[in-house]
Amino acid sequence: MAPHSDIAAAAQALREGRLVAFPTETVYGLGADATDDAAVARVYAAKGRPSFNPLIAHVPDRESAFALGRFTPEAKALAEAFWPGPLSLVVPRAPSCPVSLLASAGLDSIAIRVPSHPMALELLSAAGRPIVAPSANPSGKISPTTADHVRRHLKDKVAIVLDGGRCKVGLESSVVSVLGDGPKLLRQGGVPRAEIERVLGHPIAVESHSARPHAPGQLLSHYAPHAEIRLNADAPREGEAYLGFGPLHAHGAWTLSAKGDLVEAAANLFRLLHEIDATGVARIAVAPVPHHGLGEAINDRLLRAAAPRESA
Ligand code: TXA
Ligand code: MG
């Protein structure tokens, strides 16, 4: 844990419009004052992010969240069930919403999240205003799950990197929109779809990938390591590194989870992709991952990592 004084300094930097990387339970975020247009613009610039891709506003509690947007009973039920935690809700902006329009990228909706990492909550309380925070990686690259990942790729772009250890969930938040035409799952993530449906009491529509996706971050090629990725591989071929699921066999040095646990696999996914990529190998073969629970989100990220590259 960073000492209290580090968090106070980070909150001060945020209030001055500077960028601060901080841990959440999902991945590390690249934080900026959400109410400051210039600070928000700096986030897009630091990430090299297409400007049409809106950002999530992070707040320390539900009351602060409810002040930013208009929550239907279903949106409120999801907030009560999963906040603080790995869920982002996209709702219509409240008329008085102080978040920069740039953060919404021209939409009249806003994505909001209350993270559960204690250091994130402390920082958000100390900052005293909503903080936008995309994952702290260059656009299109693998999301960071340690402070070291952030330092490696964005170091000179941020004022402070708060170190809160390894992210427990390891995958970004699930993004659900509740905009009047019923809830939609825009991004699979840290809360499995089945748990969301249990709270809603009915199945949720899943927004499929398209050229102009609803959650604009859902461009097909994303989370891309330098190495090429080959999916559903039962064994590596010549020249490939192998990322397994289940006990380590003769095949290689890496497994998402030796005991075949999807929660553990989610927590390890981005870290292991970073680690294998750092060896300089040209191709990574990945074992099949069961498609239930967090496996749906893991397979979503793997599919994107394997997709033909856009300019990123
Ligand atoms: O777990 C997370 O959500 C992490 C941590 C740092 O909180 N943040 C994160 O942010 O993953 P980012 O910017 O990498 O992804 C935000 C996603 C994108 O897919 C974006 O398109 C979508 O949320 N999004 C944001 N605002 C939206 C809106 N108003 N309507 C639809 N989608 C929105
Ligand atoms: Mg991201």
Image (tube, grey):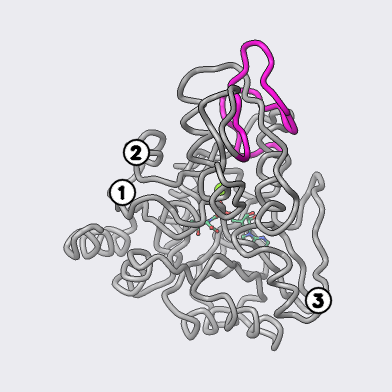
Label 1, label 2: how far apart the Cα atoms are:
7 Å
**Residue 105 on the magenta segment:** no
Q: Nearer the viewer, residue 92 or 238?
A: 238
Q: Examine the residues drawn in magenta and state their main secondary structure.
A: loop
Label 3, label 2: how far apart the Cα atoms are:
40 Å
**Residue with the mark numbered 2:** 151
**Quadrant (top left/top right/bottom left/bottom right) for the C terminus:** top right
Neighbourhood count class around disc 2 (C-alpha, 10 Å): few under 14, some 14–19, many 20 upward? some
Determine which of the numbered discs, if any, sits on residue 146 in the image. none
**Residue 235 on the magenta segment:** yes
State the image coordinates of residue 194 (x, y, percent, origin top left). Answer: 73, 68
Neighbourhood count class around disc 1 (C-alpha, 10 Å): few under 14, some 14–19, many 20 upward? many
Find numbered disc 3 in the image and state the secondary structure of the residue it sits on.
Answer: loop
State the image coordinates of residue 247 (x, y, percent, origin top left). Answer: 58, 37
**Residue with the mark numbered 3:** 182
Label 3, label 1: how far apart the Cα atoms are:
38 Å
Q: Earlier in the sequence, mark 3 or mark 2?
A: 2
Q: Tags 1 and 2 in contact by the CB under 8 Å rule?
A: yes
Q: Quadrant of residue 70?
A: bottom right
Left or right, residue 186 beside residue 84 = right
State the image coordinates of residue 94 (x, y, percent, origin top left). Answer: 60, 81
Neighbourhood count class around disc 3 (C-alpha, 10 Å): few under 14, some 14–19, many 20 upward? few
Q: Amino acid at mark 2?
A: Arg
Q: Residue at x 69, y 71 (%)?
A: 195
